[in-house]
Amino acid sequence: MYLRDRKCKVFYAPFDVHFFKKGFKEPDVMQPDLLIACDIDNNVNEEGRYMGTPTLVVEILSPSTRSKDTVDKLNTGMISGVREYWIVDPDKKLILVYRFTDYELEEYCTYKQADTIYSLAFPDLTIAVEDIFHT
């Protein structure tokens, strides 16, 4: 996968990511359900750990993670420089997409069953919501 001539890599849980939040010394270590990183060339340390900022983070809600995914991880993503953060809600069959610019919320959209998601971070990425929740 490529983003403006940069090679990107998809990672999925369990995979620790060190989120370096603006204004904080120590990173938050979290495991997003899925992420796309486009800065891997210069952000993998000597132990092979990814230490960059994901371009896109996807969290799939469950009863045990709902609060953490929709508040803590969303906020961490925003103030760490993540460009897009998707919350997939399998119970309600909807997807919330948050887009950030300069560590602030630029916009958010709610996508339902008949909608198609359009990514701003990846202009060629479109996904029909019904394909995600296809049963």
Image (cartoon, grey):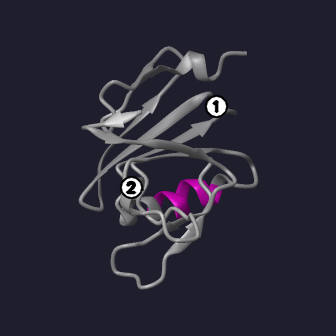
Q: Considering the numbered disc 1 on the image, is that residue within a helix, a strand or a loop?
A: loop
Q: In the rendering, which numbered label is found on residue 41?
A: 2
Q: Earlier in the sequence, mark 1 or mark 2?
A: 2
The main secondary structure of the magenta stretch is: helix
Rendering quarter of residue 41? bottom left
Question: In the rendered structure, does residue 20 fall within the stretch colored magenta?
Answer: no
Outermost residue toward the front in this view: 46
Q: Nearer the viewer, residue 48 or 36?
A: 48
**Do the residues under discs 1 and 2 have CB atoms within 8 angstroms?**
no
Image quarter where the N terminus lies is top left
Name the amino acid type tagged 1.
Answer: Lys
Q: Quadrant of the C terminus?
A: top right
User: Where does the image place residue 4, in percent across and percent down from the top left?
Assistant: 25, 37
User: Label 1, label 2: how many angstroms apart (C-alpha)?
Assistant: 38 Å
Q: Which mark is residue 31?
A: none
- Tell which tag, 1 or 2, sits nearer the viewer: 2
Query: Farthest residue toward the bottom?
Result: 25
Above-or-below relation of 113 to 38: above
- Residue that label 1 marks: 92
Q: Residue at x 66, y 52 (%)?
A: 66
Q: Residue at x 42, y 85 (%)?
A: 25
The 10 Å Cα crowd at callout 2, few under 14, some 14 to 19, many 20 or more, is few
Q: Is residue 126 above or below residue 34?
A: above
The location of residue 116, given as percent across then percent down, is 43, 19
- Residue at left offset 53%, top offset 60%: 73
Region of the chain picked out in magenta, as a range: 67-75
Q: Is residue 15 above or below residue 38?
A: below
Residue at coordinates 48% horizontally, 43% vertically from top-left?
9
Amino acid type, label 2: Asp
Query: Picture coordinates of residue 43 (x, y %)?
Result: 41, 63
